[in-house]
Image: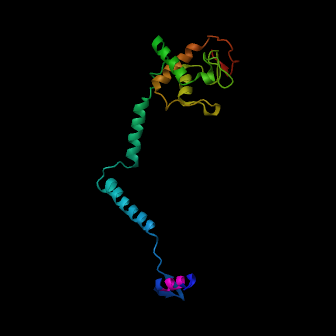
Amino acid sequence: MSEENKQIVEQEDNIMDHDYDGIKELDNPPPRWIMLMFYITIGWSIIYAAYFFWLKEGDHQDAEYARKSMAHDEKYQIETISADDLAAFTDEASIAEGKQIYTDLACMACHGMNGEGNAIGPNLTDEYTLHGCDFQSAFHTIKEGVPAKGMTAYKTQMSDEKIQKVASYIMTLRGTNPANAKDPQGEKCE
């Protein structure tokens, strides 16, 4: 018996009893590996439903998001300082810590090692500024960033207290006149 005839005989054996408008259907079961995957999926969905919905052991999306957000805030010690508490630090320890944070975050890549500015960032040592002269403006610029000019927002990377220390350090740079300072930009502070 030829291969073609053998296939026809096998098909005739697997033809189902019903037909519709002369169209006959083969009883052609899916491969075993697909059926195994199907049964595994059913089993997994029962376990999932039991864990999250019937036994109420697992967190739903909202609860899991809230838990992860709290862990993130604790890790980075994120807290908000009220406008009344927002003032420049003047003690040496806070200024030194602000300088260390300035160095650790690589602020000098854009603003220079001594705040003199470079091709990317503005000079922080002169009497001119792009985003306001007061301490609150410096704090806001560091915290919220200036995406249009490439300034990163640091509100998710460090606490308000650390931002306050960096802003305090930057305020101490005004009037220091380092070598190779970039030309003034923005409005003059009075």
Instruction: Please tell me whether residue 28 is drawn above or below residue 143 in the rendered image.
Output: below
The quadrant in which residue 1 appears is: bottom right
- For the question of whether residue 78 can be seen, the reply is no
The quadrant in which residue 81 appears is: top left
Instruction: Please tell me whether residue 64 is drawn above or below residue 98 in the rendered image.
Output: below
Please tell me whether the stretch drawn in magenta is mainly helix, strand or loop.
helix
Instruction: Please tell me whether residue 139 is drawn above or below residue 32 in the rendered image.
Output: above
Q: Position of residue 182 (x, y in %)?
A: 69, 18
- Please state, as top left, top right, bottom left or bottom right, where the C terminus lies in the image: top right
Write the start and end of the magenta stretch as one range: 6-12
Question: Which sits in the foreground, 136 or 147?
Answer: 147
Count of numbered circles on the image: 0
Q: Position of residue 171 (x, y in %)?
A: 56, 16
- For the question of whether residue 144 can be seen, the reply is yes
Q: Residue at x 47, y 21 (%)?
A: 86
Quick one: which residue is furthest to the front in this view?
A: 1
Q: Residue at x 52, y 22 (%)?
A: 104
Q: Is residue 8 magenta?
A: yes
Quick one: which residue is furthest to the left in this view?
A: 55
Q: Position of residue 45 (x, y in %)?
A: 37, 59
Q: Residue at x 46, y 87 (%)?
A: 18
